[in-house]
């Protein structure tokens, strides 16, 4: 069988087009020539498909709906992360060259270069398992001292509605009613939390509560948001190609979204200068917008956005002036090591003479006095609509 595998490798190496599962099977049939048993042919086919197609031996892990991350730190150390936490899998690579080869192939599929001159890469695979996308990051030796490090993050479509999140324990019944009221009152909000805390899942559930007659335009790095809404338009950023050209940034897309007659503008994840354009949009009549941002607590949100706004040239006083007028509510998610992801805090943003602060409305099942301020915000739009109708 080793001779067969080598012959097939040489045959596939000469292909001008991409290698597919069908191409591998055709090459195996052509090279086997009937001299090997069915068992050997199937074993060779499996080995070569893992080498040339998809994510190789990592493909079954990526297809597991419970897995969010696949991390390779050595040929015999493949780890997975998910609801059960970080754990070691049974997957093994033959050697360091096999890990390096897979990392380089995945980088090529993402339109990136990975070699000794460019020993690290960060990109998106064009097609991920089960309808999601896969972010690939790799570092080659000797930059990675122990050998090639490969990290794959699976971004599956976030489709849960608020009712499902309430049933799973992410939110309780009373908070469920408050969140629906926040969306219906067109209050702008940010969902915060750490990596993998469920920010996007909660945002998708909230967007599903937007009235069907409103047009929602969403800007994302990856197409994670799939809310149950009939007028949901998604714009996805594009990284530069290997020549460094052709990039379409989130900031570009926020500006385009403003020209698409949006009722609400959403940024899937605020991570850079696009915060300037989002705040400007929310301050010019596009109320009810939303987004997510990495933060360890609602209290850290002003400082986090201040740092991001600096990337776009927005001064600190200007940022805080726009922030307090643009965003009213912060929803903080937290991932528990041995439990589900939960909403743990609701806060309001408040403007002081020199900065922006947060006031806790609800935390871990306990309502705080600021609840009255939230109720006033929820009542204000309804009162305004009543005046217009009369």
Image (tube, helix red, strand yellow):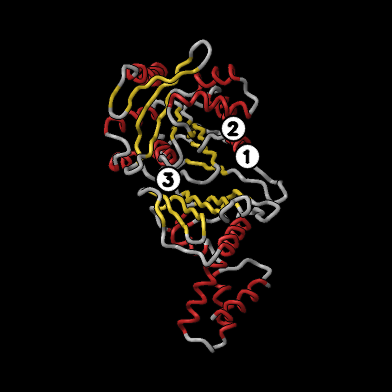
On the rendered structure, is 281 left or right of 349? right
Q: Secondary structure at mark 1?
A: loop
Neighbour tally class for label 1: few under 14, some 14-19, many 20 plus, Cα within 10 Å = some
Q: Considering depth in this image, is 92 or 366 the residue closer to the camera?
A: 92
Question: Which of the 4 quarters of the picture holds residue 372?
Answer: top left
- Label pair 1/2, CB-CB below 8 angstroms: yes
Marks counted in the figure total: 3
In which quadrant is the C terminus drawn? top left
According to the picture, the residue beneath numbered tag 3 turns out to be 158
Which label was assigned to residue 249? Answer: 1
Q: Give the x, y percent position of residue 158.
A: 42, 45
According to the picture, the residue beneath numbered tag 2 turns out to be 274
The answer to whether 368 is drawn above or below residue 175 in the figure is: above
- Label pair 3/2, CB-CB below 8 angstroms: no
Q: Secondary structure at mark 3?
A: loop
**Which numbered disc, 3 or 2, marks the residue that appears first in the sequence?**
3
Q: Give the x, y percent position of residue 360.
A: 37, 22
- Label pair 3/1, CB-CB below 8 angstroms: no
Q: CA distance from mark 3 to mark 2?
A: 22 Å
Neighbour tally class for label 2: few under 14, some 14-19, many 20 plus, Cα within 10 Å = many
Question: Which of the 4 quarters of the picture holds residue 114?
Answer: bottom right
**Which numbered disc, 1 or 2, marks the residue that appears first in the sequence?**
1
Q: CA distance from mark 3 to mark 1?
A: 22 Å
């Amino acid at each position: 069988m080793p001779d067969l595998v080598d012959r097939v490798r040489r045959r596939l190496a000469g292909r001008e087009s991409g290698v597919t599962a069908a191409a591998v099977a055709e090459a195996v049939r052509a090279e086997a020539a009937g001299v090997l048993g069915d068992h050997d042919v199937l074993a060779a086919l499996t080995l070569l498909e893992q080498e040339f197609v998809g994510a190789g031996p990592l493909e079954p892990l990526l297809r597991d709906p419970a897995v969010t991350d696949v991390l390779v730190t050595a040929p015999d150390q493949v780890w997975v992360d998910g609801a059960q936490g970080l754990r070691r899998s049974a997957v093994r690579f033959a050697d360091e060259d096999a890990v390096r080869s897979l990392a380089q192939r995945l980088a090529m599929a993402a339109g990136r270069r990975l070699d000794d001159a460019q020993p690290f890469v960060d990109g998106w695979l064009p097609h991920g398992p089960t309808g999601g996308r896969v972010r690939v990051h790799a570092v080659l030796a000797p930059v990675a001292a122990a050998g090639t490090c490969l990290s794959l993050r699976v971004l599956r479509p976030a489709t849960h509605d608020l009712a499902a999140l309430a049933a799973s324990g992410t939110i309780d019944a009373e908070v469920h009613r408050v969140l629906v009221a926040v969306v219906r009152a067109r209050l702008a909000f940010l969902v915060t939390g750490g990596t993998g805390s469920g920010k996007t899942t909660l945002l998708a559930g909230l967007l599903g509560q937007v009235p069907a007659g409103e047009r929602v335009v969403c800007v994302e790095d990856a197409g994670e948001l799939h809310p149950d809404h009939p007028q949901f338009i998604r714009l996805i950023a594009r990284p530069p190609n290997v020549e460094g050209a052709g990039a379409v940034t989130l900031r570009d897309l926020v500006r385009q979204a403003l020209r698409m007659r949006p009722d609400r503008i959403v940024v899937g994840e605020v991570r850079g200068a696009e915060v300037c354009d989002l705040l400007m949009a929310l301050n010019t009549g596009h109320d009810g917008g939303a987004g997510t941002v990495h933060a360890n607590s609602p209290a850290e949100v002003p400082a986090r956005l201040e740092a991001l706004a600096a990337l776009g040239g927005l001064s600190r006083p200007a940022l805080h002036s726009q922030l307090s007028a643009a965003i009213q509510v912060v929803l903080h998610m937290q991932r528990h090591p041995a439990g589900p992801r939960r909403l743990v805090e609701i806060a309001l943003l408040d403007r002081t003479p020199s900065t922006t602060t947060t006031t806790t409305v609800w935390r871990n099942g306990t309502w705080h006095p600021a609840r009255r301020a939230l109720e006033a915000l929820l009542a204000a739009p309804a009162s305004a609509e009543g005046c217009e109708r009369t």
